[in-house]
Amino acid sequence: MGWFSSAETDGVKKTSGGAFASPSRTNRAKCYEARDAFFECLDRNSILDSINSKDGRAATAKACGDSDLVFEKNCAHSWVEYFKKQRVVNYKKELTIKKIEAEGGEVNMIPPQLPIGKKA
Amino acid sequence: MSNCIAGATSRALKAAPPALRATAVQTSVRRTRTFASTCQNSTTSRIAAGRGAQSVRQWQGRGRGVEEMGGGEQNRMFSSSAPRGKLTTIEQIRSRNKGGPFNLTAAILFVGASGGLYVYFTTEKARMARKRIAEQTKGVGKPKVGGPFDLVDHEGKKFTNEDLLGKYALVYFGFSHCPDICPDELDKMALMYDKVREKCGTDVIVPLMVTCDPARDNPAVLKEYLKEFHPHIVGLTGTYENIKQTCKEYRVYFSTPEHVKPGQDYLVDHSIYFYLMDPEGDFVEAIGRNFTADQAAKVISDHISDWDKPLKKEQRWA
């Protein structure tokens, strides 16, 4: 299982298939943190797509290989793929919204509401 | 009685600009009938119909006289009846009522009444709209969303649709290995639930999460997972077939593979709506992601307060 097995000592606890052993709030928070760090690195290197294209994957491995590894260690593998793809989708969505707004349309988006004090 | 109409005419004439006054007098005969009838409608409605007709005839006579006399005489005729300075009793009353029906009491009454009516009609309109939504699924035949199910709760106990009767239910479909949307929505659900309880009482609504991923989400996993959101959320799981049937009844799409290996890593694509079900198990409304917790709580508590007494809320929820 390559470095997945080492992830058990380093990152979050995972199953042999690469899923979270327990997708608890703390594990999610760790994963989100690693994701944000990885995306920040992509932003710095102006990489949008780190998964769908061969060039994107190569550029990511070169520029952000380390944070990508941390990302993989702290998240379920399916989540990593999901977030990487979501980054591209979200970017396209933003572009579309900007385009609609530039044409005089209106888009109503409500950000998800999170509780202020998180329960233990 | 003739005074009423004559007075009304003179007032109307005085109000008109001087240039218009002459033409008004010249055409008065032709317009007499209509003018008199308007007066009758507006100012002399108190006068009985017969007497009103009589007064019109009288006025017509006067009008003819006016035309013979010419415009110059006209003013004197009207003003001579009540010269300024010497106030008759009628004039005193008239000056007291100069403001007409517009005084402070009337203004307050008017604003109060129109404000009250506005509030009444808007709330009633909103209530009717909600009632229409709630009753769309009532009546003959099977409800369009929801239905009987046979699942297991997070304590490992059997849980069916019967367990929900007598309370509102907020049903959400998700899975514990959901990356971002479900946790956000479950946090929102906890907020909504607390707000509704605050408004409508502690025992009117049950929050439910039905897993779309029964292979991984056994009762123990659900219990561990859901207590982080709200200790009251009931997690439901079951066999793949039972989950599939429940999802079908609730018109929920989900993409869970049927046969998964232990430890396999996959995501489930599924519909993300909260389904509000009434105490009889009928679908009321679906609440999407675009609602904030406050908006959703308002929608829910409004529906709950619409649930009226003939359905014996107090007895059923005792």
Image: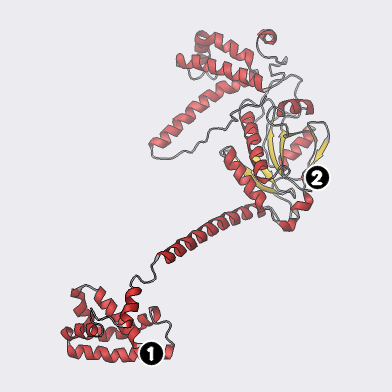
Confirm whether circles 1 and 2 share one chain. Answer: yes
B164 and B102: which one is in front?
B102
Q: Which residue is drawn at 74% across and 39% down?
A: B246
Relative placement, left or right, of B164 versus A47 is: right
Residue B46 lies, in percent from the top left, at 43, 83
Q: State the residue position of label 2.
A: B162
Q: Which mark is residue B241?
A: none
A103 and A20: which one is in front?
A20
Report the number of numbered marks.
2
Dot 2 falls on a residue whose secondary structure is helix
A41 and B37: which one is in front?
B37
Q: Which residue is drawn at 36% across and 80% down?
A: B38
Q: Residue at x 48, y 62 (%)?
A: B114
Q: State the residue position of label 1.
A: B53
- In the rendered view, tell whether residue B45 sits above or below residue B246: below
Residue B2 lies, in percent from the top left, at 34, 88
> Alpha carbon of mark 1 to alpha carbon of mark 2: how far?
75 Å
Query: Which residue is the extreme one toward the right?
Result: B157
Q: Which amino acid does label 2 sit on?
A: Glu
Quadrant of the image occupied by residue B199? top right
Q: Which amino acid does label 1 sit on?
A: Ala
Q: Residues within 10 Å of mark 1 (few under 14, many from 20)?
A: some
Residue B87 lies, in percent from the top left, at 27, 80
